[in-house]
Image (cartoon, helix red, strand yellow):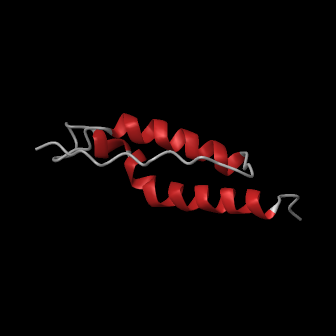
Amino acid sequence: MSNLTPEQSFCKATAQYILGATDWTSVSDVGDPTKSNPYLVNQAEFIAYRSIIRNYAVNPISDPVFPIQPTEQWSS
């Protein structure tokens, strides 16, 4: 049984959704120019973004301020 408030449950669910939608950015070869062409140039931005989101999934709060998701930047 969960002891989360409805707001915390919403925070957790939202964070889990975002993590699922951005999982692909964590695949090692997506940001590796020796393995992928094109490759995700700003993979580090997604890693930092997902770290903040993961914190909300693990430690949900009532009034989260979700950061803006980075825009994909691909090599040419």
The quadrant the C terminus occupies is top left
Question: Total marks drawn?
Answer: 0
Residue 18 is situated, as x and y percent measured from the top left of the image, at 51, 57
Q: Residue at x 46, y 60 (%)?
A: 21
The quadrant the N terminus occupies is bottom right
Q: Is residue 70 left or right of residue 60?
A: left
Q: Residue at x 73, y 45 (%)?
A: 59
Q: Quadrant of residue 46?
A: top left
Q: Residue at x 29, y 40 (%)?
A: 31
Query: In the displayed structure, would residue 17 be above or below residue 67?
Result: below
Query: In the displayed structure, would residue 16 be above or below residue 40?
Result: below
Residue 52 is situated, as x and y percent measured from the top left of the image, at 57, 40
Q: Quadrant of residue 23?
A: bottom left
Q: As rendered, which of 43 and 3 lies closer to the eye?
A: 3
Q: Residue at x 74, y 48 (%)?
A: 61
Q: As rendered, which of 34 and 6 lies closer to the eye?
A: 6
Residue 70 is situated, as x and y percent measured from the top left of the image, at 37, 45
Q: Is residue 60 left or right of residue 5?
A: left
